[in-house]
Image (spheres, coloured by chain):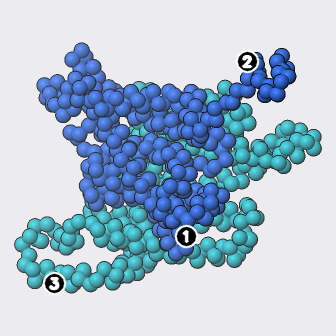
Amino acid sequence: MSSRTVRTEGTQPQPSANDQLRFRQVESPSKRAIRRFFRHKLARFGLAVLAIMAFVAIAAPVIAPYSFRAQDLDHPRNAPSAAHLLGTDSFGRDVLSRLIYGARVSLSVGLVAVGIYEMIAIILGAISGYYGGKADWIIMRIVDIVMTFPTLMIILFLVALLGPSIFNVMIAIGIVGWTGPTRLIRGQILQIRELDYVLAARSVGVQNVRMIVQHILPGVIAPLVVHATFGVAGAILTEAGLSFLGLGILPPAASWGNMMSEAQELIILKRMPWLWAPPGVAIMLAVLSINFIGDGLRDAFDPRGMHGS
Amino acid sequence: MTKYIIQRLLVSIPVFFGITIIVYALYALAPGDPIVNIVGQQVFETMKPEEIQVVRQQYGLDKPWYVRYARWLGRALQGDLGYPLKGNRTVVEWLGERIGPTLLLMGTSMLLALAIGVPMGIIMALKKYSFLDYFLTVVAFAQLSVPAFFLALAFMYIFSLWLAILPTHGMATIGAPFSLWDRIQHLVLPTIIMGVFSAGHWARYTRMSVLEVMHMDYVTVARAKGLRERVVVLRHILRNALLPLVTVVALSLPSLLGGAIIIETIFQWPGMGMLGWRATAGRDYPMLMGLMLLSATMILLSNLLADVLYGIVDPRIRYD
């Protein structure tokens, strides 16, 4: 123990500067989570790459050297040169510009499609988990039935119905994706419902809707965000695959997927790698970063893996 | 046990009907008048309303939707799925022809994925936080993040065009007599792509499962008893960690169906995936409906199988 001056006259003993009791600021859970997230090396990397991509996507009209649809039929299929850093495609369009604009497509489709189905999942999951009973049974049966279909097949059917376009791709992915998260949210709500603070809120008289929104949903957000992050990665891959097959976003619109579809011709595959390699690497980089971020988020919210993923 | 199986079967029946309803509903939503498909575009434009009405009655298209659904379902259950828009064989014949290659591709690639992924996952879990774990984690992530078609194109580029040791398309060389080696050569690339792709997924799952088991009390007891580490790992950890894997494998069988579409199209592999792609591009609804019905039924059956397996493997489930 350090030296302590003891007053002898009735006053409270003041601790000296040496052993002043220092209370550590209690860290809020969110701050703790953020700190854990940034400790994750791969997640930091992913966030950096994603930030760059987002910037490129937003600043596309400013950064891109050419318009993505400007054709130059005098110079089709040119190898990379000073004028066209990544060469040109079959219609003379600049590959680099299309790559930059493609970022817009991929990121927006990912975010919107996941946004759609997570919203559906929150509503249905909350109804199912909180109210239970008949509504729960019906919703879970529908989830069972829809989950019995291979997802890509439903998406294909929807695209066949609606026609290929960026909005239809978003809608198709959104319509198919809500089943998983609905189950997840329902499970989470079933757990949270039993917790003490919910009982406390109810005993004070909190009504149903307010109960769900203010007390229950915040507990659901963490796994939901993790799930949504991985969902964006998946949606980007799905959109790329659809566009590649000619069933998603069609040219002249620039999507990383449809930039690669020409490579199905062997000549292009063999002689003109600048047409299909950059978009492929771009997709891979985007999805990889998002997956890293998702993993970092998952570790940040729940490092001991107590909640099911 | 039998009661459990019967229970599961009974639950599956309404799910099956739900599937048929969804498939039919999707078709009913399709734009365009089916009459056009029957008589052809030009004829349709020259027909008078009464003539159209006659054709409608002839094909029963004027009945309410539930009657049409019931008739479609009746025929489907008897194995009659109609004719595709193009081609002159029945949908069932097309499906039957194409399902074999798809199953071949699926089966081989799943075996490959398991052979690679499961050991990867076990190593990752047993040596957690080691360099190997991190390295394999990145590898597994990379496998999950690469778009399948990009990998396919890249491999095709390397092996078929650059090195020219493997063929690019199809199941067998056209016109050549049947040769097992030829078939294997054609099978290699698509299988590797699909297998590598899912290996990462299995690795992650196995790793999670082993990690969970590793912290269980009975493992600590086993070690405390003085058993050799090898016995602890093999008999206690792995056996308990890998059992649920069996059911997950059964559950994921049908998802292989979906993934095949892109690979099959790139490699021109004559399977159901390519059929689905062509049907979508050509808006061939009868074919799409048949495909969806078949896939969904297969998934339903494999879910049932997975549940039964789970019941066998884990006695706690049975007495629910």
At which x and y percent is residue B260?
Answer: 45, 50
Of the residues tagged 2 and 3, which is closer to the observer? 2
In the rendered structure, which amino acid carries the disc numbered 1? Gly
Identified at 51% across, 28% down, the residue is A44
Q: State whether residue A2 is above or below residue B120.
A: above
User: Callout 2: residue from which chain?
Assistant: A
The location of residue B222, given as percent across then percent down, is: 88, 45
Same chain? Circles 1 and 2: yes
Residue lying at 14% horizontally and 79% vertically, measured from the top left? B52
| Within-10-Å neighbours for mark 2: few <14, some 14–19, many 20+ | few
Residue B102 rendering spot, x and y as whole percentages = 47, 54
Give the CA separation, mark 3 to mark 1: 50 Å
User: Depth check: A10 or A145 in front?
Assistant: A10
* Element at label 2: loop
Q: Residue under mark 3: which chain is it in? A: B
Q: Secondary structure at mark 1?
A: loop
Q: Which chain is blue?
A: A
Residue A124 located left or right of residue A10: left
Q: Is residue A85 above or below residue B317?
A: above
At 20% from the left and 26% from the top, the residue drawn is: A66
Residue named by callout 2: A17
Crowding at label 3, few (<14), some or many (≥20) Cα neighbours within 10 Å?
few
Q: Which residue in the structure is indicated by mark 3?
A: B54
Q: Which residue is mark 1?
A: A132
- Rendered hue of chain B is cyan
